[in-house]
Amino acid sequence: MINQFVPKIINEIAKINTENELMNLKSKYLGKKGEFTIFTNSLKDLSIEEKKKQGPIINSIKKEIESIIADKFKSLKRLAIDKKLAEEKIDISLPSKGSSNGSIHPLSLVSEEIVKIFTQFGFEVFEGPEIESDHYNFEALNIPEDHPARDMQDTFYLGEGNLLRTHTSPMQVRIMECNNPPIKIISPGKVYRCDSDVTHTPMFHQIEGLLVDKSITFANLKGVLNEFISRFFGNSIKTRFRPSYFPFTEPSAELDIEWKDKNGSKVWMEVLGCGMVNPKVFESVNYNSKEYAGLAFGMGIERLAMIKFGITDIRYFYQNDLKFLKQF
């Protein structure tokens, strides 16, 4: 049955005319919830002997699928470049139209607005290294080597125990290691994951928040984030906290906002993750979890910008298209 994937994909690729369609097809088959991935995950119940037989076959077919998609991507890239060159021919003998002033990038606008709001709440701003150790990125945040949460983060490993950080959460540990409570910080910066489609890029931006003190409760967390949402999106926005799971917080939640989709219907949309700092994280920095409590939250700047400005494809932020950028 697994051999049927290749001719099926070849047939579908033949009908594809854009890179966006190809990325969607790649997600359809090779993404975390893709057909090929679901099929291979189902093989875990096979006997060891069968796994040894099927393993090389599965890997070979996956490489073939990746190669077919890569070749199609190169072909579409060449066609797109040729088309763009044909459409953008100019007479270089004409005089210049002069220059124009630049503007602040939409991601910078959103990042600056978020930082401004939280600094008004009394949070201090700290930035951290983009190349992290396994200890800070995973171990100290209650994500040991065999933890399933590591599979969610598609990490770029650099060797010698180093990696490109997958989130800004390592700054929680770095700040607490060097400071005693009370702590009230946010940490903006770039993060990296092996993921790319209309809502994900290999590099994106996050802002981490941490508040540690005596008598901190979930009510404090809700108060801070509800006030942030009202200032960022407007006072009329409704919010809800939905139970979730993160290894470094307990309890954990996703914060949703009530939003109107393109049809004008009201929907709940996830905007950030949050929770109370897990005592395991306090153990890693020698904090007494019986004396202190903490709240933490993390949000993707691109996600907030897409919601606020009605942008449907995250890749627009990185294409250096002046027609897009001049809108801001």
Image: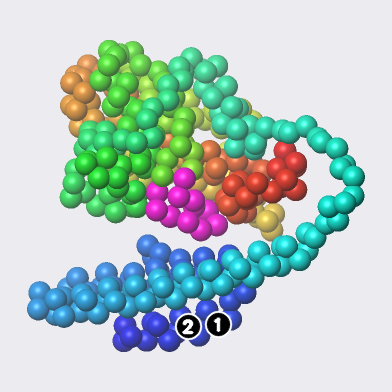
- What is the three-letter code of the residue carrying label 1? Ala
> Residue 225 colored magenta?
no
Report the predominant secondary structure element of the magenta stretch.
Answer: loop
Residue where numbered disc 1 is placed: 14
Q: Tell me residue 23's x, y (percent).
A: 51, 65
In this view, the residue farthest toward the front is 93
Question: Are the residues tagged 2 and 1 within 8 Å (C-beta)?
Answer: yes
Residue where numbered disc 2 is placed: 10
Q: Quadrant of residue 233?
A: top right
In the rendered view, tell whether residue 251 sits above or below residue 2: above
Residue 232 in view (yes/no)? no
> Residue 201 colored magenta?
yes
Magenta region: 193-203
- What is the three-letter code of the residue carrying label 2? Ile
Q: Tell me residue 187's x, y (percent).
A: 43, 27
In the rendered view, tell whether residue 203 sits above or below residue 141: below
